[in-house]
Amino acid sequence: MRPGLREAAPEDAAAIETLLVDAFGGDEEAALVRRLRKARLVEVELVAGAPEGPCHGHVLLSHLDVVADQRRIRAVALAPLAVAEAERRQGLGAALVAAALARSEAEAVFVLGDPAYYCRFGFSARPCAPFEAPFRPPHFMALALAPGALNARSGRVTYPPAFGL
Ligand SMILES: CC(C)(COP(=O)(O)OP(=O)(O)OC[C@H]1O[C@@H](n2cnc3c(N)ncnc32)[C@H](O)[C@@H]1OP(=O)(O)O)[C@@H](O)C(=O)NCCC(=O)NCCS
């Protein structure tokens, strides 16, 4: 993992909230993170920055209910991802995503985001096509971490109530 990245600890909660509110201009993503933690759905949560200092970056993977051709697969949602404005365009966002994916035990990762950003990690809308889901391409994308995990004729992606959909 890139120096300065580490697993989020309970003591980081306030700094993470400050980062998320600043990065997204509101409380929605911070509230999502609170609900995911409360529902014990967090698989991986990483931060950039020293303990007790400001949080420069944050990424979270949470468990997602995904069925592919009647087989339940281990899947996670990547959300949210944020980097403090002053730290952007130095590869921190990419390092957070790469480190989170490397730590994940999921077979597949789903994300809702900008295709121009997430395609660099291998995310693509194509594997989502057979899946019933609350989101549509092009912003709804997926990445198979286990080869073939998303090769399905049909399937379903169900987001937990924590997402408030
Ligand atoms: C998106 C974000 C996490 C990127 O963090 P970062 O540390 O700057 O990312 P990186 O340094 O790895 O990559 C920067 C590159 O991504 C590009 N980029 C950033 N946001 C982008 C977007 N929404 N769409 C397309 N490209 C984007 C930048 O232009 C930059 O391109 P360059 O490398 O050609 O200069 C950060 O801009 C951020 O926190 N934004 C606000 C919150 C947000 O939108 N989160 C993503 C939700 S899906």
Image (spheres, rainbow, N blue to C red):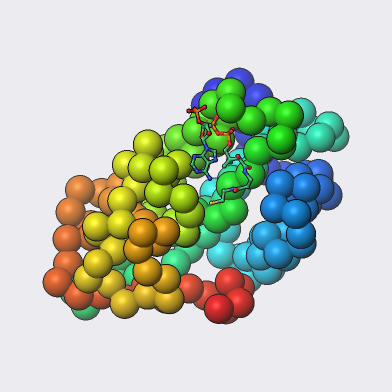
Residue at the image position 17 percent from the left and 67 percent from the top: 152
The answer to which quarter of the image holds residue 109 is bottom left
All told, the count of numbered labels is 0
Residue 20 in sight here: yes
Residue at the image position 36 percent from the left and 42 percent from the top: 119
Residue at the image position 58 percent from the left and 27 percent from the top: 89
Nearer the observer, 76 or 57: 57
**Picture layout, residue 22 above or below residue 1:** below
Q: In this view, does 58 lie to the left or right of 79?
A: right
Q: Give percent across and percent down for residue 8.
A: 68, 43
Q: Give percent across and percent down for residue 46.
A: 61, 41
Q: Give percent across and percent down for residue 16.
A: 75, 47
Q: Is residue 43 left or right of residue 4?
A: left
Q: Residue furthest left?
A: 153
**Picture layout, residue 10 above or below residue 158:** above
The answer to which quarter of the image holds residue 142 is bottom left
Nearer the observer, 129 or 42: 129
Residue at the image position 68 percent from the left and 28 percent from the top: 87
Quarter of the picture containing the C terminus is bottom right
Residue 10 in sight here: no
- Quadrant field for ligand 1: top right
